[in-house]
Amino acid sequence: MSETKRLDRFLTECFEISRSVSGKVIRAGQVSVNGKIIRDASFKTEIGDEVEYAGQRVEVYDKLYYMLNKPDGCVCANDDSHNPVVFVHMRDVPGINSCHCVGRLDLDTTGLLLVTNDGQWSHRISSPKKHLGKTYRVMLADPVTEELTDMLRKGILLAGEKKPTSPAEVEIRNDHEIDLVIYEGKYHQVKRMIQAGGNQVVALHRIAVGPLALDPALEEGQYRRLRRDEIELF
Ligand code: URA
């Protein structure tokens, strides 16, 4: 799982400087590894090495795995010209620039978002072939009907799609709230399914991805590292 990383690349990821600036500051003797100045940009760092630059010391990390309780109003992207990105809530994570979101939630969807720099792990979670259930708590504009729950459970042919959605699991929590488990990740899928069933989503919150549930201790905008046993669920 572990890999060594060139010093210039590590600096670029951690300190938000370009590769050419990182090469320059290394050659200028402004960077030390474990207390020793290193002037070679291709120097291979090891996991656990301490890299110091511009008064900041950062430990060389391996793969990173986090869960974020995504708040409303931020986008699942590394850059966006209109809205803040989810990573603004994780600015103090060393190496966050090397990370991406595992799948996407809409701007106004809240809840469990996985963030990693391990492409193979995120592929195992997102791949449609894995049929991993994603559980959403759905607040509805109108009271839930049997017609809607039957449609969700059978599968719905959404506008512009060739095949109906695969059967979803539905648990009714109260008149206006259901927990819905879906096994695909089509664009705005939950909102489109609910709309096709004659209702509207007023709030959408993801509570689990496969067997991994959102930590109830996390407030919106808070994150934590995943434990080894949680990483190994996928
Ligand atoms: N379905 C939606 O409609 N939106 C999301 O953010 C996730 C699933």
Image (cartoon, rainbow, N blue to C red):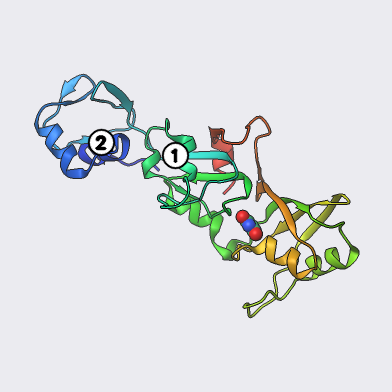
Secondary element at image label 1: loop
Please name the residue that numbered disc 1 is placed on.
64
Crowding at mark 2 (Cα within 10 Å: few <14, some 14-19, many 20+): many
Pointers 1 and 2 in contact (C-beta within 8 Å): no
Instruction: Tell me the quarter of the picture where residue 35 sits.
Output: top left
Which mark is in front, 1 or 2?
2
Q: Is 190 located above or below residue 178 in the figure?
A: below
Q: Residue at x 68, y 47 (%)?
A: 205
Whichever of labels 1 and 2 marks the residue nearer the N terminus, that label is: 2
Image quarter hosting the N terminus: top left
**Is residue 43 among what the camera can see?**
yes
Relative image position of residue 213 (x, y in whole percent):
67, 42
Q: Is residue 98 left or right of residue 46?
A: right
Ligand 1 location (quadrant)? bottom right
Q: Is residue 42 visible?
A: no
Give the distance between the C-alpha atoms of the residues marked 1 and 2, in whole angstroms. 16 Å
Residue, disc 2? 11
Q: Position of residue 48 (x, y in %)?
A: 33, 28
Query: Residue at 63% across / 62% down in the picture?
Result: 131
- Residue found at the very far bottom of the displayed protein: 162
- Characterize the local packing of mark 1: few (<14), some (14-19) or many (20 or more) Cα atoms within 10 angstroms: some
Please give the name of the residue rendered at 70% of the width and 60% of the height, measured from the top-left corner. 182
